[in-house]
Amino acid sequence: MIIPLESIDEETLQNLVESFVLREGTDYGEVEISLQEKVDQIIEQLRAGDIVIEYSEEHESINIIQKP
């Protein structure tokens, strides 16, 4: 199930994206990117509609995925 971005509180969105970024790792190659910069990039992609927040009822988990 895709969760509409506008239905998520800003603080919750920030925490969700931080958790996602930390799960995915922080090695971005030769250029260091701060956690907040990466979080901002993900939120920008969410707002642009390039990626979406998906809730899995089966796994009772939330993930950020490419737009289907």
Image (cartoon, grey):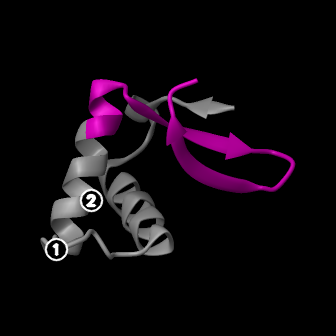
| Disc 1 secondary structure class | loop
Q: Name the kind of residue labelled 2 in the image.
A: Val
Out of 25 and 4, give the one closest to the viewer: 25
Position in image of residue 35 (x %, y %): 23, 72
- Location of the C terminus (image quadrant): top right
Is 43 one of the magenta-colored residues? Answer: no
Count residues near mark 2 (Cα–Cα under 10 Å), then give few for <14, some for 14-19, many for 20+: many
Residue 11's image quarter?
A: bottom left
Residue 60's image quarter?
A: bottom right
Count residues near mark 1 (Cα–Cα under 10 Å), then give few for <14, some for 14-19, many for 20+: few
- Location of the N terminus (image quadrant): top right
Residue located beneath label 2 in the image:
39
Residue beneath the point at 37% across and 67% down: 18
Residue located beneath label 1 in the image:
30
Mark sitting on residue 56: none
Out of 9 and 18, give the one closest to the viewer: 18
* Mark 2 or 1: the one toward you: 1
Using the numbered discs, state the Cα–Cα distance from disc 2 to disc 1 in whole angstroms: 19 Å
Residue beneath the point at 70% across and 56% down: 61
Q: Name the kind of residue labelled 1 in the image.
A: Glu
Labels 2 and 1 touching (C-beta < 8 A): no
Residue beneath the point at 16% across and 70% down: 33
Position in image of residue 4 (x %, y %): 49, 29
| Disc 2 secondary structure class | helix
| Earlier residue among tags 2 and 1 | 1
Q: Which residues are magenta?
A: 45-68
Is 53 one of the magenta-colored residues? Answer: yes
Q: Say how many tags the image has.
A: 2
